[in-house]
Amino acid sequence: MAKSSNTKVNSKTSNPVSTDHGSARTGPVRFEDWSKNHVLDRKVGERIWRLYFDARCGHAAAEYNLEQAGMIEMIQAHVSGKMGEGDNGWGDCRWLLTERGRRTSMANLQRIMLRDPPLAIAQADVKDEASDVADDCGGCDPGEPDLMQHYRILAHLLMRAERILAAEKRRGSR
């Protein structure tokens, strides 16, 4: 491994160690760096889930908006805002924060997540949530609080998609 500006040598083992915390994970990363970055990735993921359960934003929209703003990079052939064949819901490790994303405050990341996505992404959120509700969220009984929460999320995502569609129609008529 050639020594570069973001590579140092471990004094104990004489092995090269990447100190690059950015998106180009080309060499070995020290455990301390990986652990710190993993915690930040997890905190952003938890914020996405909180926004989802508060019926403020769908997973596809949050992920798409973060990637478009350069805050995350998709990994393992995932595509932002799209559920792939064989994915384990939105719980899969789909992305990592970029250096830019790590330098951005959680408040700014949340503002980015809450932006209106393109209509196709908003419709994907509605379709995924409608599928969950149609499946009774994995076996919930009618009237159960978890199922009612998913109905509320679906209603919000549907209103959001309708608002985006209306805005696109207004822009198209000008």
Image (spheres, grey):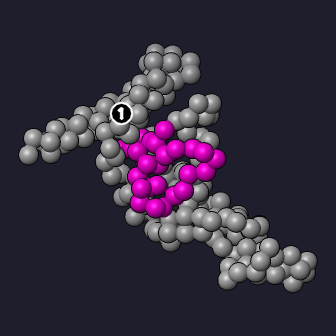
Q: Which residue is painted at 45% across and 18% down in the image?
A: 134
Name the residue: 55% across, 69% down: 99
In the displayed structure image, the side of residue 96 where residue 10 appears, left or right: right
Any part of residue 92 in sight: yes
Tell me the quarter of the picture where residue 35 sits.
Answer: bottom right
Q: Position of residue 152 (x, y in %)?
A: 36, 31
Observer-nearest residue: 168 or 147?
168
Residue 54 seen anywhere in this rendered image of the structure: no
Tell me if residue 2 is in the magenta stretch.
no
Q: Which of these two is toward me, 166 or 133?
A: 166
Q: Magenta stretch: give its range.
A: 54-82
* Residue at numbered disc 1: 123
Disc 1 packing (10 Å; few <14; some 14–19; many ≥20): many
Q: Is residue 153 above or below residue 111?
A: above
Could you tell me how many numbered marks the image carries?
A: 1
User: With respect to residue 41, does 62 lie above or below?
Assistant: above
Q: Nearer the viewer, residue 142 or 30?
A: 30
Residue 19, position in %: x, y? 70, 76
Residue farthest toward the front in the current orientation of the protein: 2
